[in-house]
Amino acid sequence: MSSPNKGIGTVEVALRWDPSTGGEPAHDLDIIAATYHADDPYGEPAYLVHFDSRSPDGTITLNRDSRTGQGFGDDEVMTLELERLSSGYVRVVVGVAIQQRWGRRTFAEVANTAVRISEGRTALRVDDFGSVADATAATVAEFARDSSGAWGFRGTVNGFDADPATFARTMGADLG
């Protein structure tokens, strides 16, 4: 659909955290994007993008994936080319999940977590997960296509107490 309205175009979601210390198992956080069809914008995701995957059309890509939080700069980076996404998709929800393979971990237990959502040089949202410190996963962004075809952004952080697989299935429920 073509429209003269300018909406959100290409977005970058960048996640960072500090590595675990003192011989503890590594902290492994993952960015997950769920894409929804127009006929079921709050149901099951049409597809998910996370570590070792990308969208079928290449519009959503995980560019960097860390399993430890070690290194300089951002630990995980995902690019969403919303302006190229098929008009059959009307909603994309982005979240962060903490892997739970070594027992339940919350954002409060992972040092210096932060997410930055930006379009070009413009920061749309920066958050440290402090409002969802007891959660094991959180949605961090919702992008929705309006009736003109332009993409809008909602940056509300919502915490979940779920393993990554359950979170991925349920993260797109009506976020209120």
Image (cartoon, grey):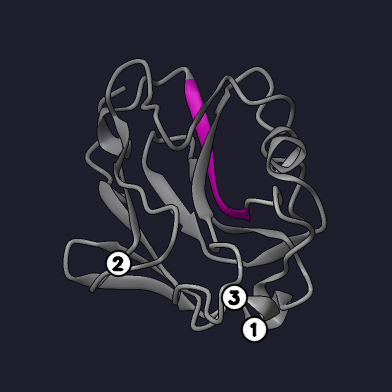
Which residue is identified by label 2?
Answer: 74
Drawn side of residue 84 relative to residue 93, left or right: left
Q: Mark 2 to mark 1: distance in Å?
A: 19 Å
Q: Residue at x 61, y 71 (%)?
A: 24
Residue type pointed to by label 2: Asp
Decide: is 56 above or below 67: above
Drawn side of residue 76 relative to residue 99, left or right: left
Identity of the residue furthest to the front in this view: 23
Instruction: Write down the region rendered in magenta.
Output: 89-98
Q: Can residue 10 be seen in this view?
A: yes
Q: Is residue 143 visible?
A: no
Q: Residue at x 59, y 63 (%)?
A: 25
Report helix, strand or loop for mark 2. loop
Residue type pointed to by label 3: Val
Report helix, strand or loop for mark 3. loop
Q: Which of marks 2 and 3 is in front?
A: 3
Which residue is identified by label 1?
Answer: 130
Q: Where is residue 66 in the image (x, y as percent from the top left)?
A: 38, 53
Drawn side of residue 170 relative to residue 111, left or right: right
Which residue is identified by label 3?
Answer: 110
Residue 47 magenta: no
Q: Position of residue 173 (x, y in %)?
A: 76, 41
**N-terminal of the two: label 1 or label 3?**
3
**N-terminal of the two: label 2 or label 1?**
2
Decide: is 157 above or below 42: below
Identity of the residue furthest to the left in this view: 121
Q: Nearer the viewer, mark 2 or mark 1?
A: 2
> Do callouts 2 and 1 mark residues in contact (Cβ within 8 Å)?
no
